[in-house]
Image: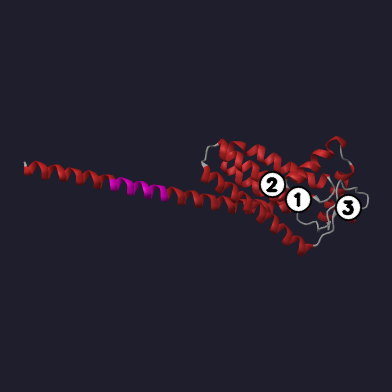
Amino acid sequence: MLLQSIDDRAAVWIATHRLAPLNELFVWLGYVEKVGAVWLVLAILLGLTLRLGVIPTVTLTLLTGAATFAADSASFGLKDLVERARPFVAHPQIDPLYVVHSSSFPAGHAATAAAGATLLSYIAPRAMPGFILLAAAIAYSRVFVGVHYPGDVLAGALVGAAIGFVAIGVWCWLRGTDTRLGEALAEMGRRDRKAIGSSRYSGRERTAGGA
């Protein structure tokens, strides 16, 4: 009960002490994070920037989409189980910057942001601080606009991070499969060239013998 009380008071305080110039920014962050859309764009940009190639870039984009979709789906599954009222419903003093009608726990935007940030941070470790900052800003925006409690955000981030780590495992497996396939094809190529060379050498021996 103590944690819930702290959660309630934090949500009310943040939503009732907004800096008006930041309102549009935090509302906008909620829109660009819809079903993890921003992370799909970032995955494409990473593939192009790192010159991963067409197939790896498409693979990364699809995997990012799958991870954010899985995080969003998991959060909605938990929402149906917990059925926590939104802060602006439980606390009339909160004036939400926009209204949503699903239950509150956990925060889906925080889940998708954490999933995307976790996966892309593995792909581009140097960009990790930027990804973490973006995910944190998206997560905080949910409390700022008055539609989530801090506890919702933390739970969503944990769900998303877990799914992000699973996505990293899938990426490593796929890249390992590509590497093994590439090595196998290279070995086949070497054997073919060796066989052709041996055949030519044998042909020259027969010609010399016939002369």
> Of tags 2 and 1, which is closer to the observer?
2
Give 175 or 149, whichever is nearer the viewer: 175
For the C terminus, the quadrant is: top left
> Of tags 2 and 3, which is closer to the observer?
2
Label 2 vs 3, first from the N-terminus = 2
Residue 59, horizontal then vertical, whole percent: 55, 48
Residue 132, horizontal then vertical, whole percent: 67, 41
The numbered mark at residue 140 is none
Specify the amino acid type for callout 1. Answer: Val
Distance in Å between CA atoms under marks 2 and 1:
18 Å
The numbered mark at residue 88 is 3
List the residue tagged with mark 2: 37
Is 77 magenta? The answer is no
- The region drawn magenta spans 181-192
Q: Is residue 192 left or right of residue 134?
A: left
Residue 112, horizontal then vertical, whole percent: 69, 50
For the N terminus, the quadrant is: bottom right
Q: Is residue 116 visible?
A: yes
Residue drawn at (69%, 58%) of the image: 73
List the residue tagged with mark 1: 153
Residue 66, horizontal then vertical, whole percent: 62, 53
Label 2 vs 1, first from the N-terminus = 2
* Image quarter of residue 40: top right
